[in-house]
Image (cartoon, grey):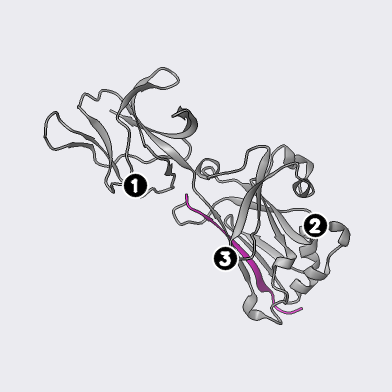
Amino acid sequence: MGPYLPLLRIDVEHGYYADGRCRGLRFVPAGTTAERLRRADALVRADGGTLLVHGPAEAVERLRADTDPDDGEAALDWLVHATDDDFACGTEDPADRPRELLWVAPGAPSADDATLVATPRALDAPEVTALLAPGDRWLPPFALLHLPLPSLPAHGPADNATAWPVQLRWPLAPRATVWKYCLFGDWPEPALAVVDLAGETEFSAPAPDRLDNGTPMLAIRSRVRLPLAQRSPRRFQLRSRPDGAGSPKVLIRRLPTAAAQLLARETIDGQPTIVSEIHVHR
């Protein structure tokens, strides 16, 4: 057996995190994957945002040869569990939880074959059920990573070194919400307004509102959904424009940005909407 070589690298990108790399993902081999990799003398390493498979040059041929017609399509599969505190609230998730998860697999052949495609898939779909353990139905994984072996290059590193390692990316988008500035305390200044210094986002006029416990406040909402970010680059100011033609007065030079955890659900224009509450006290 020769030296161990990098065979597969999957990087999970995430627009919420400051460096663009996902955090806290746990990859658990599903189905026959762990046994297939063991028989091929392959090793798996993961750091929460990247999955790596190393093995000898002949590991690919061993994986391809280690198939059973009764197993259906030969593939490597991992259950993907999210453990980071900000992940659930900070991730745009098209799956209908808890009835669905994300099925992550190579897309149709195209110019961007390196990008994996995530689509919602029902937990009771046959291809999903076959890979879930009984306990997984009570606490389903965030995603199921499915890599058919035929999607790998036909020849291993010994015959086609330039094709290895196979490098794939799985992009995840940050959750986008309506940002709601909740102003508590006494705000007697006229014509309060939240202003985007970049001139990209408009906000509603302040309106009286209350928390669920009855605490009064003024609420100012963004007119569009904005992506959440661990370190948001957005610069919003709270201003007041005196009556007449006077220059606006800056009350708060830089307002805080939305945090991933402070989410609420409201009905806006007749549609249920996820809202990020940002509390500002005086």
**Label 3 vs label 1, nearer the camera:** 3
The residues tagged by marks 3 and 1 sit, at their Cα atoms, a distance apart of 31 Å
Residue 185 is labelled as none
Residue found 63% across the figure and 49% down from its top: 119
**Label 2 vs label 1, nearer the camera:** 1
Q: Residues within 10 Å of mark 1 (few under 14, many from 20)?
A: some
Identify the mark nearer the N-term, 2 or 3. Answer: 2
**Label 2 vs label 3, nearer the camera:** 3
| Residue type at tag 3 | Asp
Residue 112 is labelled as 3
Residue tagged 1: 234
| Residue type at tag 1 | Arg
Q: Which residues are magenta?
A: 1-16
| Residue type at tag 2 | Thr
Queried whether the magenta region covers residue 269, the answer comes back as no
Determine whether, in the image, residue 199 is placed left or right of residue 8. Answer: left
Q: Residues within 10 Å of mark 2 (few under 14, many from 20)?
A: some
Residue tagged 2: 32
Q: Residues within 10 Å of mark 3 (few under 14, many from 20)?
A: few
Determine whether, in the image, residue 197 is placed left or right of residue 263. Answer: left
Residue 191 lies in quadrant: top left
